[in-house]
Image (tube, rainbow, N blue to C red):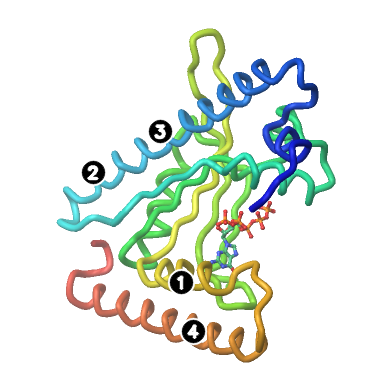
Amino acid sequence: MDFNKDELMEYFLVDNPDNVMDKLLEFNRLMMKYRSAIREVTTKLEVLNDELSLYGNRNPIEDIQSRIKTPVSIAEKLKRLGKPVNMDEIMENLNDVAGIRVICPFIQDIYRVADMLTRQDDITVIKVKDYIKNPKENGYRSYHLIVEVPVFFSDVTQPMRVEVQIRTVAMNFWASLEHQIRYKKDIEDAEKITKELKECADIIAVTDEKMQKLKDKILGEMK
Ligand code: 0O2
């Protein structure tokens, strides 16, 4: 991607060349806060995984990945929302600056982990999108939560928002490949490709259901 100087200044939230350093420091501080929020939520998930693995002899969480949105994506999303690009607008309008992806073996694990996380006293649920019960038109399946978690800094306790996407290994397989080849891209023969990707998503969903049933049969529903 090529950016001119004005775009670069805007993307890094610098509104005046005289305060570049101040703005960069402020931006870094905000990103540090989001990274801290990721750590808080990740630790909660790791604790749940450790505890549940003691009872069930298997891990309900296979992997936890996280990322902070890049400055360019932050600025582009604010622009898409018709908002000015500055720090206050980030905190106010963006729910996914801090993102955590939780990969579970089975569909049941997703709801168990989501339920146990959201029942914790210091977690506030801001939004839930169940793209498993209500898949997107293109076949995308995943359970999305926006949560707020208090983070304790030296001088203040701040509620920070984190997007948590929870999905099975199979859903993640589809979403990762679809993201690489299709999501948000203009492509030729889009209709046929969209149909084929949807077919793959549906096959994967049936497989997930079957694997869940096999697991219940062999290990029991509570494990
Ligand atoms: P990236 O590049 O992954 O960061 P909202 O602001 O919550 O009302 P939004 O942001 O559209 O609306 O939320 P939604 O629908 O919950 O989607 C958020 C994220 O889910 C996306 O982030 C993707 O990571 C993922 N996602 C949603 N739909 C699809 C899809 O069809 N395919 C794939 N592969 N991923 C999807 P970003 O920021 O759009 O993208």
Q: Quadrant for residue 213, please give it.
A: bottom left
Coordinates of residue 182 in the picture (x, y in percent): 58, 74
Q: Secondary structure at mark 3?
A: helix
Q: Nearer the viewer, mark 1 or mark 4?
A: 1
Residue type indicated by callout 2: Glu
**Precedes in sequence: disc 1 or disc 4:** 1
Q: Secondary structure at mark 1?
A: helix
**Which image quarter has ligand 1?**
bottom right
Q: Secondary structure at mark 4?
A: helix
Q: Residue at x 23, y 44 (%)?
A: 50
Q: Which residue is mark 2?
A: 51
Query: Observer-nearest residue: 101 or 15?
Result: 15
**Precedes in sequence: disc 4 or disc 3:** 3
In the image, taking residue 84 as reference, residue 157 lies left or right, namely left
Distance CA(mark 4)–CA(mark 2): 33 Å
**Precedes in sequence: disc 2 or disc 1:** 2
Would you place residue 205 above or below residue 25 in this image?
A: below
In the image, taking residue 71 as reference, residue 55 lies left or right, namely left
Distance CA(mark 3)–CA(mark 1): 27 Å
User: How many other residues sit within 10 Å of disc 3, few (<14), some (14-19) or many (≥20)?
Assistant: some
Q: Secondary structure at mark 2?
A: helix
Residue type indicated by callout 4: Asp
Residue type indicated by callout 1: Leu
Q: Nearer the viewer, mark 2 or mark 1?
A: 1
User: How many other residues sit within 10 Å of disc 1, few (<14), some (14-19) or many (≥20)?
Assistant: few
Q: Which residue is mark 4?
A: 202
Coordinates of residue 203 in the picture (x, y in percent): 43, 86
Q: Which residue is mark 1?
A: 177
Q: Residue at x 66, y 89 (%)?
A: 189
Would you place residue 41 above or below residue 154 in this image?
A: below
